[in-house]
Image (spheres, grey):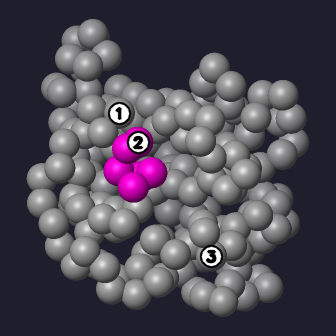
Amino acid sequence: MANVIPNLVTERLLLRPLGLDDAPAIQTVFPQWEIVRFLASHIPWPYPPDGAESFLRNVALPGMAAGREWHWSLRPKTTPEQLIGVISLLVGEKNNRGFWIAPEWRGQGLMSEAVVAVTDFWFKELGCDLLRAPKAVENITSRRISQSSGMRLVGTETHSFVSGEHPAEIWEITAVEWRARKGTT
């Protein structure tokens, strides 16, 4: 797997690889119940004052350097200095993509744009065959993003989230399905 992480660009967003200098912005935006409640239970809550820096130093940056993880900040093209969310790709059998966006930026299709960009990267640049994304059944917005990006529901399980144990749906899409959807070979 490649460990060079490029900038990605969508119609309205700049996706920049995360760096340690993103810690203050993440620390300001991320610790909101609306953002964290359906994220994996390993995320500390209440979020500690050094949570963003700890995540970057101990999880994201080592994973990126090892070529196992790819993390980008989401920034509006109109205000590229403003971090409004994060989207990540991860090597693993059960979970390959995760994301969050500040509540005030939701409902504009921005995360859908970011999902298309990183899914293209997953299949085209990394050469992966399958992308899987579990999500809490209650997380309707995330489900809609999976549906609109061509993923299909393949199962349900119980997962531990920051807000507790919840039924979770497992969504996936293959490289063949993605290429057919995009009209590429």
* Residues under numbered marks 1 and 2 in contact, where contact means CB atoms less than 8 Å apart: yes
Residue at left offset 44%, top offset 31%: 116
Q: CA distance from mark 2 to mark 3?
A: 20 Å
* Foreground pick, 111 / 173: 111
Q: Which residue is rendered at x = 41% and y = 42% of the image?
A: 145
Q: Is residue 155 above or below residue 7?
A: below
Q: Position of residue 52 (x, y in %)?
A: 71, 73
Q: Residue drawn 77% across and 49% down?
A: 83
> Does the stretch in magenta take in 143?
yes
Q: Which label belongs to residue 145? A: 2
Q: Which amino acid is tagged 1?
A: Ser
**Marking on residue 18:** none
Q: Residues within 10 Å of mark 2 (few under 14, many from 20)?
A: some
Under tag 2, what secondary structure? helix
Query: Which residues are drawn in magenta?
Result: 140-145
Residue 26 appears in which quarter of the rendering?
bottom right
- The foreground one among 29 and 147 is 147
Q: Residue 39 placed where, x, y %? A: 47, 71
**Amino acid found under the numbered disc labelled 2:** Ile
* In the image: residue 49, left or right of residue 4: right
| Amino acid type at mark 3 | Trp
Res 56 quadrant in image: bottom right
The alpha-carbon separation of the residues under discs 1 and 3 comes to 25 Å
